[in-house]
Amino acid sequence: MKGELTAILEKAPEGGYWAICPEIPGANGQGETIEEAKESLKQAVTLILEDRLEDAMRGLPEDTIQDTKACLSRQDSLGVATVQISTFKS
């Protein structure tokens, strides 16, 4: 399984940059530089997905099968960052 998330970055009127991930409501970041804004967004996405996982796992039987995910970040030629998520059975 492979998934990609979109990062949209734009200059903020007061200086610096804003970043949002339209696939994950509430995931946004900001920073003085593009790199800071992307890192802030990455942290927001991680926190939201971890929280959703905790909610989903709450109350499940102990013998539920879980998979391990590996996340990689890349940037295309236009500066749009994506996060790739690969699943490996454990």
Image: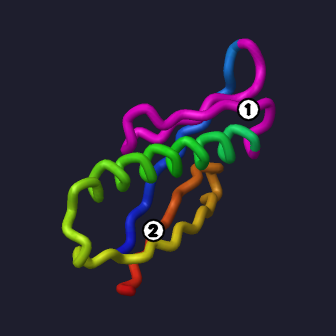
Bin the neighbour count of mark 2 within 10 Å (Cα to Cα): few under 14, some 14-19, many 20 and up: some
Residue at figure coordinates x 28%, y 54% from the top left: 58
Q: Which mark is residue 69?
A: none
- Asked where in the image residue 75 lies, by quadrant, the reply is bottom right
Label 1 sits on a secondary structure element that is strand
- Asked where in the image residue 3 lies, by quadrant, the reply is bottom left
In the rendered view, tell whether residue 28 sits above or below residue 64. above
Q: Position of residue 61 (x, y in %)?
A: 20, 68
The C terminus is located in which quarter? bottom left
Query: Residue 69 or 21: which is nearer the viewer?
Result: 69
Q: Residue furthest bottom?
A: 90
Q: Position of residue 32 (x, y in %)?
A: 79, 30
Query: Residue 35 or 65: which is nearer the viewer?
Result: 65
Determine whether, in the image, residue 60 is placed left or right of residue 9. Answer: left
Determine whether, in the image, residue 37 is placed left or right of residue 86. Answer: right
User: Which amino acid lies under the numbered mark 1 shown in the image of this protein?
Assistant: Gly
- Asked where in the image residue 1 lies, by quadrant, the reply is bottom left
Name the residue that disc number 2 marks. Answer: 85
Bin the neighbour count of mark 1 within 10 Å (Cα to Cα): few under 14, some 14-19, many 20 and up: some
Residue at figure coordinates x 40%, y 83% from the top left: 88
In the rendered view, tell whether residue 70 sits above or below residue 38. below
Determine whether, in the image, residue 18 is placed left or right of residue 51. Answer: right
